[in-house]
Image (tube, grey):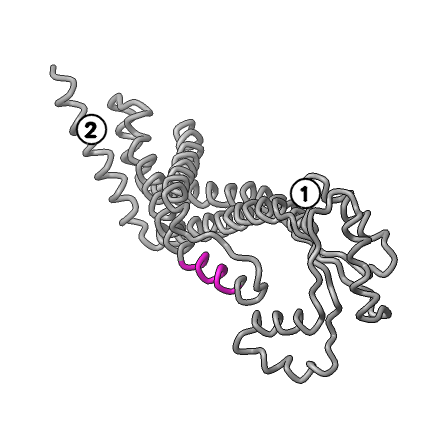
Amino acid sequence: MNFKSQFRPDIAYFLKEGLSGIRLHGLMSVAAVTVIAACLLIVSTFVLIAYNLDVQIDSLASQDEIAVFVDDALSRDEARALELSLKSVPNVAAVTFIPKEEAFDRYLEQLGEDAYIMEALRDDNPLRDEYRVIMKDVSLHDETVEGLKAIAGVAATNSDKELSDRLGHIKRIVNAISYVLVAMLGAVSVFIISNTVRLAMFARREEISIMKMVGATNGFISAPFVVEGMTLGLLAGLIAFFAEWVVYGYISERLVRTSGIFEMLGFVQFWKVLLPAMLVASAVIGVLGSVLTIRKFLRV
């Protein structure tokens, strides 16, 4: 007997029966694909946000500039006199003075078309005179900031490193949420697939009993249902991927508009990794949900 010729019809049979099961329970299949796709979309969105935060944090942490804001109580001459004190702080490479009028003009440029909203405040400028301090060694950021803050007349400091630390805190929260979502939504997805396959097996229970009586192996009986579960999972993965493409673009645009500084990476930069990852994850969910139901059903 030619093993290959016997094997090929079996594969065709498994595929045919698996796909017919999906058609037979069309409404349940659509519901399963929709729920799993939604679960994958939510998880992938959080994962991509966490990845973007990582990139942003690394970029900000490498910046060597610190903004030093001058106390409002100081006159312009006194504010300029701070330059020598700032330069004397260890790890300071260069110091640039920015009058509050210039800072206000820069702020208006950043606002673009909305600049007219703030123009009325020009005569009562809410900004402070400031210095831009360049560090020699970024790794000494914290020590440098402490030295700058200790100078009389310095009201506050701000730097990308400080923003990086705040983003790091946000990233830890996002990661924690992601882990919880992976566990919860993964379990929900497996449960949905499991119920869908259980329904298909129940509808064919008499056929399964006859197959067992004539000597069909559990593997032969199970294969079509595994194909059904995996196909549902793969369909959900594809839908979730294209939905993520749209959702990610929307989130990216909104973040840029509202924050003005946080710019997410383009989707094109990681879709080649995301697509296979989502397909593998969805296929595993489909197979796992199928196997759990099949094992219980065939024991009865």
Residue 163 visible in the shown view: no
* CA neighbours of label 2 inside 10 A, class few (<14), some (14 to 19), many (20+): some
Q: Which residues are magenta?
A: 246-254
Q: Dividing the picture into quarters, in which one does residue 196 lie? A: top left
Relative horizontal placement of residue 127, taking residue 43 as reference (left or right):
right
Under circle 1, the secondary element is loop
Is residue 292 depicted above or below 268 in this figure? above
Look at mark 2 in the image and give the residue it sits on. 10
| Quadrant where the image shows the N terminus | top left
The kind of residue tagged 2 is Asp
Q: Position of residue 160 (x, y in %)?
A: 65, 52
| Quadrant where the image shows the C terminus | top left
Please tell me which residue is depicted at 64% across the width and 79% down the height of the picture.
Answer: 118
Q: Dividing the picture into quarters, in which one does residue 270 lie? A: top left
Look at mark 1 in the image and give the residue it sits on. 136
Tell which circle, 1 or 2, labels the residue nearer the N-terminal end. 2
Is residue 27 depicted above or below 203 in this figure? below
Please tell me which residue is depicted at 53% across the width and 50% down the height of the picture.
Answer: 49
Q: Position of residue 258 (x, y in %)?
A: 57, 66
Using the image as rendered, state which of residue 46 and residue 268 is in the foreground: 268
